[in-house]
Image (cartoon, rainbow, N blue to C red):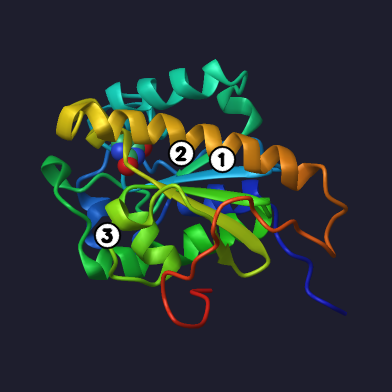
Amino acid sequence: MPAVARTLEAARLEALGCVRCALNLGRTQVVYGTGSPDADLLFVGEAPGRDEDLQGEPFVGRAGQLLTSILSEHGIARSDIYIANVLKCRPPNNRDPLPDEIEACRPWLAEQIERIDPLLIVTLGNFSTKLLLETSVGISKLHGKTYRFGERWLIPTFHPSAALRGGPNGSTTRDLRTDIAFAVDTIGRLRAQPQPTARPEPQRETERASSEGQLF
Ligand code: URA
């Protein structure tokens, strides 16, 4: 008999007890992800910060409030989409994720992508973009364009924390807004297409960030 795939909720419950890396020693709680398990649109950030660690939900601090507010300008509620991170536990003092932590945590994100099965993934910042596109190219070059991610599409954009800092002449904030507007437009066009056999060519140039292959 074929194995029955477990639900996202079953995966989440297992993740709550994860001890795959040392971050479990310092966390208040695992921040698995939040939103609709059937979402067409999946946002992937970097790692929980202090607020997220305390509340157990991704993107609830200042960066998250900016993201939530931009989405609401497009009539999108957090419950309409799914939001996750590369790391499910907060690194001490919000330091960058380490390679071994990303490696240990990667199966949780891979399973989220498989179970949610989104049409479009929006990566927020360098860590999720580089991980999923398997590239060393930075976000400034990659943002705001569509990339193939297996059967799906992926649009990288800046991390909302970078947008809070503004960037040169506020350009990062503007780019985040523009890229999210583009993602909202893209998901509308993807939903309008017959699924799953045909997915539309995006309006903007489609590029490959890395030469070949998929991460998962
Ligand atoms: N930054 C992230 O990358 N993720 C969060 O959940 C919060 C801040």
Asked whether disc 2 touches disc 1, contact meaning CB atoms under 8 Å apart, the reply is: yes
At a point 63% along the width and 36% down the height, the residue shown is 185
Q: Quadrant of residue 38?
A: top right
- List the residue tagged with mark 3: 138
Q: Quadrant of residue 138?
A: bottom left
Residue 21 percent coordinates (x, y): 28, 63
At a point 26% along the width and 44% down the height, the residue shown is 90
At a point 78% along the width and 43% down the height, the residue shown is 191
- Image position of 97 (left or right of 70): left
- Image position of 200 (left or right of 64): right
- List the residue tagged with mark 1: 183
Q: Quadrant of residue 52?
A: top left
Q: Quadrant of the N terminus?
A: bottom right
Residue 133 percent coordinates (x, y): 43, 67
Residue 179 bears which disc, if any?
2
Provide the secondary structure element on which disc 3 rests: loop
As rendered, which of 185 and 91 lies closer to the eye?
185
Residue 31 percent coordinates (x, y): 40, 41
Which residue type carries mark 3?
Gly
Tell which residue pokes out farthest to the bottom in this image.
212
